[in-house]
Amino acid sequence: MECFKILNYIHQTVVPLGIKFDQQLYLYPTGNRLDRVAITFNKNDYELLNKKLEKGDI
């Protein structure tokens, strides 16, 4: 459940700024448990997010 809370925080932070990201959920092969979550940004969106974080525009 913590992974989904973190994804929700990321979504609430970056989407209003117009920044796009992708998420990929990885499950354990023998069950329905979540193994890990990968979050990716394209380079331009990542740089824009870093600039906004540095300036405190969030």
Image (cartoon, rainbow, N blue to C red):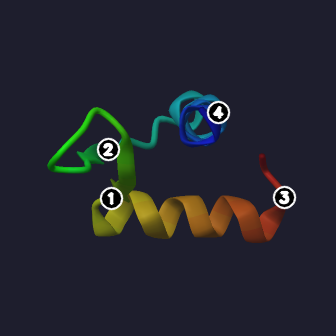
Sooner in the amino-acid sequence: mark 2 or mark 4: 4
Amino acid at circle 1: Thr
Q: Can you give x and y, in whole percent of width and height, for residue 44 in the image?
A: 34, 64
First along the sequence among labels 1 and 3: 1
Which one is closest to the eye, mark 1 or mark 3? 1
Q: Nearer the viewer, mark 4 or mark 1?
A: 4
Marker disc for residue 23: 2
Q: In which quadrant is the N terminus drawn?
A: top right
Which image quadrant is residue 53 in? bottom right
- Three-letter amino acid code of the residue under disc 3: Gly
Q: Which mark is residue 5?
A: 4
Q: Residue at 47%, 70% (x, y): give it.
A: 47
State the CA–CA distance, disc 4 to disc 1.
17 Å
State which mark lies toward you, 2 or 3.
2
Left or right position of 51 against 4: right
Residue that badge 3 annotates: 56
- Disc 3 on helix, strand or loop? loop
Q: Amino acid at mark 2?
A: Gln
- Disc 1 marks which residue? 40
